[in-house]
Amino acid sequence: MHHTLRIATFNIHKGVTHLNARFALHHQRDLLRKLQADIVFLQEVREEHTPHRERFSAWPKFGQAEYLADAVWPDFSYGKNSVYPTGHHGNALLSKFPIINSSNVDISAHSSEQRGMLHSEINVPGWDQPLHTICLHLGLFAQWRRQQLMAVTEFIQTKVPADAPLIIAGDFNDWGMRTGRLFAEQLNMHEVFERHTGKPARSFPSWLPLLRLDRIYARGFHVNQVEVHSGAQFIKISDHAMLSATLTRTQKLP
């Protein structure tokens, strides 16, 4: 029975470096593999982009989610959010355990920004009920983020059992942190870095993190360890740091 899970969240910036200078997906895959995470939440996963396919010879044939999952994560799901003439991108989840159900819900707050929440149910061996996960990338403006988190809260309250283990992770764009705190309180969740260190992690820009944009919220888990993966080498990887956490499932929700 897997009581303990290793979780990671990472905005991969569409598989290219800052200002689209270099193809970085192979570096991102190497980094993710070294983490040995059981479940990975990904944002800005670009499944199709004609100009980049033509520009970068290493562009994956079957999409970025499958390329990153490869032989390490047998199951993955992808939620198409932003669609444009040359391709599309969205959120993705990689899992070492079977994904038994997955759906992508439109939570766009404005016509100029397409956003979605990727909800997946994962069958962790030995657990009495599925793990629910939600991968998010919220809007750039506070008013839009509030609307989007209200939509996520309503979805969880109606679709996810109150006693089910739940992890929500992604790029919240919430540097003020107020919206996220209210969201967590309403759902009886805690942000894992805040629980462990007192504050959410600094994650942007990845080479010298200042802003606390990326989050991991959990319900039904004890936080064992958290880590920010950042530094000068990330200039060749992504503009967001990668966050990871080791969580142990508690027998009863607090």
Image (cartoon, rainbow, N blue to C red):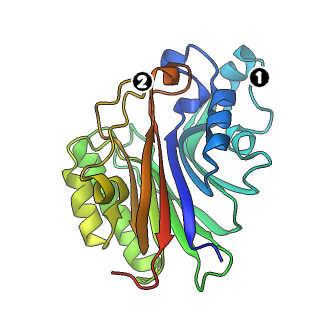
Q: Nearer the viewer, residue 224 or 70?
A: 224
**Going 65% across and 28% down the picture, which residue do you hit?**
27
Residue matched to label 2: 207
Q: Secondary structure at mark 1?
A: loop
Relative height, residue 84 to residue 149 (above, below): above
**Going 67% across and 42% down the picture, which residue do you hit?**
33
Tag 2: amino acid: Trp
First in residue order: circle 1 vs circle 2:
1
**Going 20% across and 43% down the picture, which residue do you hit?**
176
Q: Secondary structure at mark 2?
A: loop
**Going 41% across and 63% down the picture, which residue do you hit?**
223
Relative height, residue 244 to residue 23 (above, below): below
Dividing the image into 4 quarters, which one contains the N terminus? bottom right
Q: Nearer the viewer, residue 244 or 132?
A: 244
Please state the horizontal and vertical placement of residue 167, each as a whole percent of the image.
46, 64
Q: Quadrant of residue 112?
A: top left
> In screen coordinates, is 209 left or right of 62?
left
Badge 1: residue crowd in 10 Å (few <14, some 14–19, many ≥20): few
Badge 2: residue crowd in 10 Å (few <14, some 14–19, many ≥20): many
Relative height, residue 110 to residue 2 (above, below): above
Residue matched to label 1: 58
Tag 1: amino acid: Ala
Q: Nearer the viewer, mark 1 or mark 2?
A: 2
Relative height, residue 164 to residue 95 (above, below): below
Please state the horizontal and vertical placement of residue 183, each as a whole percent of the image.
27, 62
Dividing the image into 4 quarters, which one contains the C terminus? bottom left
